[in-house]
Amino acid sequence: MSYQALVLFDIDGTLTRRAGPHHREALAAGIRRVTGLATTTDGIPVQGMLDPVILATMMRRAGARAAQVRAAMPAVMLAVEGYYLRLCPDLRDKHCPGVEPLLARLARRNILLALVTGNLTRIGWRKLERAGLRDYFRFGAFGEMAGTRAGLAKLAIRQARREKLIERDAPISLVGDAPADAIAALANGIRAISVATGLTSAEELRRERPHILLKDLRELRLWMVETPLGADGNFTAEPQRRREEEQKG
């Protein structure tokens, strides 16, 4: 089956928010179990960071050397995932505004949905399961799969094309609440859609020059993800008629 477009979503601050301290607690608990180090995320600007990068920063701040961090990381990530899977709360009331109606609408339009998130794989999927959103997403690129968010986006795009889920000229968008999401989208030549439902203000998001900046996902319109980008990175032949029809409907 070939989809008409691909939309990649971040999780925290984009699909869900105010999900509690459990993720941060899992990071510290996993490090403590494997290395014995007492660590914290306090003072680390975690928004937009990949979980392995956060873990490495926590361990380095607690005195671990780079070689020790590298050696411990595989076991630490497994411990973190195990801790979070046991304690993840019900997140069905933690959706960002407009999330589930939008996902349902995109799915009805034959648009492929996937994840690009800094969460470790099992943490990301568990969050969506507990939020009741898992079935909307075909696959994901997660924090341990690449060194940067741009690298994760590239992996997701490659998978969609390799599995022939989209044509090479299909529109691709990345939706996220952090500057890192817009940077990753622009680095891959795809549409950057920033949404101000996380910790970053609209003013800060605007500095990264996303193609579209939304207050929340209730403002996202189909033409925003169905319209291709031109060679200059701008919309090609904006479908005015379709937008007018949507506004009427």
Image (cartoon, rainbow, N blue to C red):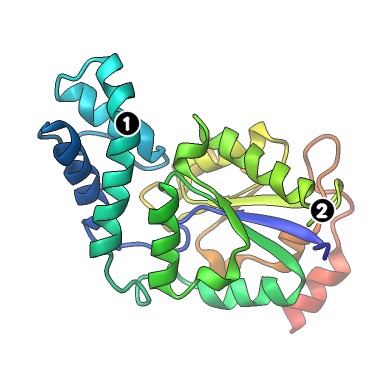
Residue appearing at x 70%, y 62% in the figure? 112
Give the SS element for disc 1. Answer: helix
Residue 222 vs residue 205, the one in the foreground: 222
Q: Which residue is mark 2?
A: 164
Residue appearing at x 57%, y 78% in the figure? 101
Residue 154 in percent (x, y) is at 65, 37
Q: Which residue is mark 1?
A: 73
Could you classify mark 1 by the number of other residues whose Cα lies within 10 Å: few (under 14), some (14-19), or many (20 or more)? some
Res. 73 visible in picture: yes
- Residue 226 in the figure: left or right of residue 200: right
Residue 238 in percent (x, y) is at 84, 56
Could you classify mark 2 by the number of other residues whose Cα lies within 10 Å: few (under 14), some (14-19), or many (20 or more)? few
Q: Is residue 132 above or below residue 59?
A: below
Residue 49 in percent (x, y) is at 40, 37
Q: Quadrant of the image for the N terminus? A: bottom right
Give the SS element for disc 2. Answer: loop
Residue type, mark 2 in image: Lys
